[in-house]
Amino acid sequence: MKKRTFLKLGAAAGLGSWLAAWLGRGAAWGAAMPERLHNWAGNIDYSTENLYAAKSFAEAKEYVRKTAKLKVLGTRHCFNTIADSKDAFLSLTEMHDDPELNEAARTVTVDANMTYGKLAPWLETKGFALHNLASLPHISVAGAISTGTHGSGEKNGNLATAVKGLQLVTSEGDVVEMSREKGGPFLNGAVVGLGALGAISEVTLEIQPTFQVRQWVYENMPMEAVRAHFDEIEASGYSVSLFTDWRNRNVNEVWIKDRVGGGKEFPAKPEFFGGKLATKNLHPIAAISAENCTEQMGVAGPWYERLPHFKMGFMPSAGKELQSEFFVPRKDAVEAIFAVEKLHEKISPHLLITEIRTIAADELWMSPAYRQDSVAIHFTWQPDWPAVKAVLPEIERALAPFGVRPHWGKLFTMAPAELRPRYERLPEFVALAKKLDPHGKFRNDFLDRYIFG
Ligand SMILES: Cc1cc2nc3c(=O)[nH]c(=O)nc-3n(C[C@H](O)[C@H](O)[C@H](O)COP(=O)(O)OP(=O)(O)OC[C@H]3O[C@@H](n4cnc5c(N)ncnc54)[C@H](O)[C@@H]3O)c2cc1C
């Protein structure tokens, strides 16, 4: 029998007392009120509590077939309403099949909502690795690829570029399989699917032999070094991140992740373009303890314990925060960074930290790095939406000359009419969505507004 699950976030009470408190919320909004179903940051209360947690593929398929309208939820790390639903949620996070390794094909096939934090150590025990990871391993594979989630590295495509195949439950409960071999262009349209095409049940990822990474951090590199040496800075490691609060015309921290045995070794001199080698582990937000961060100081370790900034099992980033991120062509990186720098007096009061990363071009229709090597300018904001909402249009205006594309899972204010022309394959994506989901079962307000118009 299908089981309907209501999430009781943070509430130790059983369903009876939880429901009683919930129904009595009009009188006791506040202390007695149970938390609503919300995203990781807590800035979005989802529009329904109706969540079904499938424990098997058969349960998921049946739920999709029978339900009139729904969204699939991953680990809820998006900051905007892309994952929201007014009707129903399907969670696949309780499906726990073992990954399936194909050593000959160099692939691993996983339940779609497995987290990278679970997959990566498992892969390591088998001697394999993924090409890259995001700043945190806590997110699900399907949720990450659906929004074009990325790490850094000028030669590294986003996490979705590792996808070699997908299994999707479409709106009628049919199962569609796509792979690079059997449906190349079709797969390119479906991977960064924004949750609009169906419920992804399995993902096949390209893997490679495991590798080690060393991580170094430099402090206080002058911003002018970015203007003069951006290409050299970005080429200095397998993955490079520049963190700045835009306050003192400097890059507060440069994180360099160097692949051991990856050709030329990073020399780790005491100075890097005017920045000084850190003498202890640091958090990107200097005021926060580095305990939550992956090991630095040049200590070699497995790929999955160095490529993310934050460790699994620990709070990533600041916790109480909002995030935005904007992609521009890599060739415009310096101009774009300095266009943002001009706004520092408006940005800094509301900012926790900015991170600047590079991402290699890809062929995925809805990827912000579609056919362009990109630089992503990210903002971790204080949790003050009115202030952030006021400054975002200024950043978007400053980056408009570069054809800026916002991160699909973070906060932006750009109008749909401005956003849509930035994705030349959007008409084909809409056609694909209409083919797989003719009645819009997987659509929500966000998708109607930005994609389907
Ligand atoms: C602290 C923090 C750090 C972050 N760091 C980075 C970073 O380094 N780089 C970066 O690019 N982003 C980063 N993000 C953003 C994050 O990676 C994305 O928001 C990502 O999409 C979250 O994945 P999720 O599993 O939480 O998905 P959710 O937020 O749950 O869902 C995202 C989308 O995927 C869809 N979806 C999920 N599962 C399925 C499925 N099985 N089938 C179909 N659709 C599905 C949902 O419907 C929704 O549209 C960060 C976020 C946080 C909170």
Image (cartoon, grey):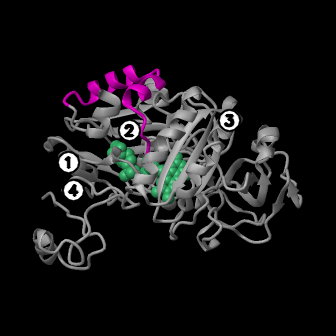
Asked whether residue 352 is in view, the answer is yes
Q: For the magenta stretch, what is the residue range?
A: 411-439
Mark 4 vs 3, N-terminal side: 4
Identity, as a three-letter code, of the amino acid under mark 2: Leu
Q: Which mark is residue 52?
A: 4
Q: Which mark is residue 194?
A: 2
Residue at mark 3: 333
Residue at (53% x, 60% y) in the render:
122
Residue at the (20%, 78%) spot, across then down: 32
Neighbour class for label 1 at 10 Å: few (<14), some, many (≥20)? some
Q: Which of marks 3 and 1 precedes in the sequence?
A: 1
Of helix, strand and loop, which one carries label 2? loop
Compared across the picture, whether 6 is left or right of 273 comes to left
Q: Are marks 4 and 2 in contact (CB under 8 Å)?
A: no
Q: Which mark is on residue 86?
A: 1
* 425 drawn magenta: yes
Mark 2 beta carbon near ligand 1 (under 8 Å): yes
Give the amino acid type for the residue marked by disc 3 in the picture: Ala
> Which amino acid lies under the numbered mark 1 shown in the image of this protein?
Lys
Cα distance, mark 4 to mark 2? 20 Å
Question: How far is mark 4 from mark 3, CA to CA?
Answer: 44 Å
| C-alpha separation, residue under disc 1 versus residue under disc 4 | 14 Å
Q: Is residue 351 left or right of residue 240?
A: left
The label nearer to you, 4 versus 2, is: 2
Does the magenta run of residues contain 258?
no
